[in-house]
Image: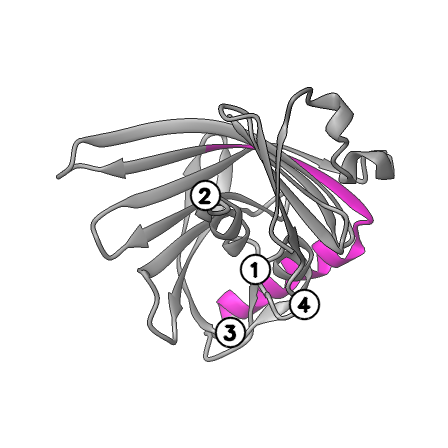
Amino acid sequence: MKKITVLFTLIFLAFAGVAHAQDAKAKAILDKLSEKMNALETMKFKFSYTMQNTQDGINETKTGSIYIKGNKYRLYIEEQLVICDGTTIWTYFKEDNEVQINEVDPTNQNTPDKMLTSYNENYKAKYIKEVPKAGRILQVLDLTPLTTQSFYKVRLEIDKTRNMVYSSTIYDKNGTTFTYVVTEFVENPKIFNSRFTFDEEDYPGVIVNDMR
């Protein structure tokens, strides 16, 4: 049985506000970022995702995009599509022409709307430095989990001028790193609600796996 990809959870970790045991400078930066996210009605991101593990010879890069409107979202990552209307989640696997249907878990904090607009008390934030990169000034922060996780650190690079995450890197305990770079960000794009439902007629012969 397939599982919804961990990419969905990890990519939004970068945008979480952090309220617990953080230094003043990190808190100010994340407060400002969270305030901006709260003010937006809709948003669109394009990103690249790279998974690396030198020891195992892994170096894979994928691209994706996501549309967000409140608690609704439409996420593309190469051969996978995840759609949520706030109540139901459809995960479509292009290679198998299969869709999984699940109910939204109201206790799940790793959803786009919660990660983008809410404070998360499970991480400690630390300001590291400010560096020039890719023609911009980046503020570098480290997030460390306060409870046991499969990763031990997330490094954020925040564009100081645009007040937006430029990249995030998750450091897994097995030596793998997952790096996400925002290649395009659009504030308040016009998004029709029809983008947040899965229409089986658009996927002839699709295999439906209703897990509700």
The answer to if 79 sits in the magenta stretch is no
SS assignment at label 2:
loop
In the picture of the structure, the residue carrying the numbered disc 1 is: 110
Q: Secondary structure at mark 1?
A: loop
Magenta part of the chain: 25-48
The Cα atoms of the two marked residues, 4 and 2, are separated by: 22 Å
Residue 28 on the magenta segment: yes
Viewer-nearest of labels 3 and 4? Answer: 4
Q: CA distance from mark 2 to mark 1?
A: 19 Å
Q: Nearer the viewer, residue 119 or 105?
A: 105
Spot occupied by residue 12 in the image (x, y as percentages of width and height): 55, 51
Rendered image: mark on residue 106: 4
Which residue is at a point 71% across and 61% down the rendered structure image?
35
Badge 4 marks a residue whose secondary structure is: loop
Closer to the camera, 207 or 37? 207
**In the rendered view, would you say 51 is above or below 23?**
above
Find out whether the residues at labels 2 and 1 contact each other: C-beta distance under 8 Å. Answer: no
Q: How much space separates mark 1 and mark 4, taking CA atoms?
A: 10 Å
Q: Is residue 77 visible?
A: no
Mark 3 — residue? 24
N-terminal-most mark, 3 or 4: 3
* Callout 2 amino acid: Lys
Q: Which mark is residue 2?
A: 2
- Comes first in the chain, label 4 or label 2: 2
Query: SS at mark 3?
Result: helix
Residue 145: image location, x then y, percent: 39, 69
Question: Residue at 61% of width from left, 59% of height from top?
Answer: 115
- Residue type marked 1: Asn
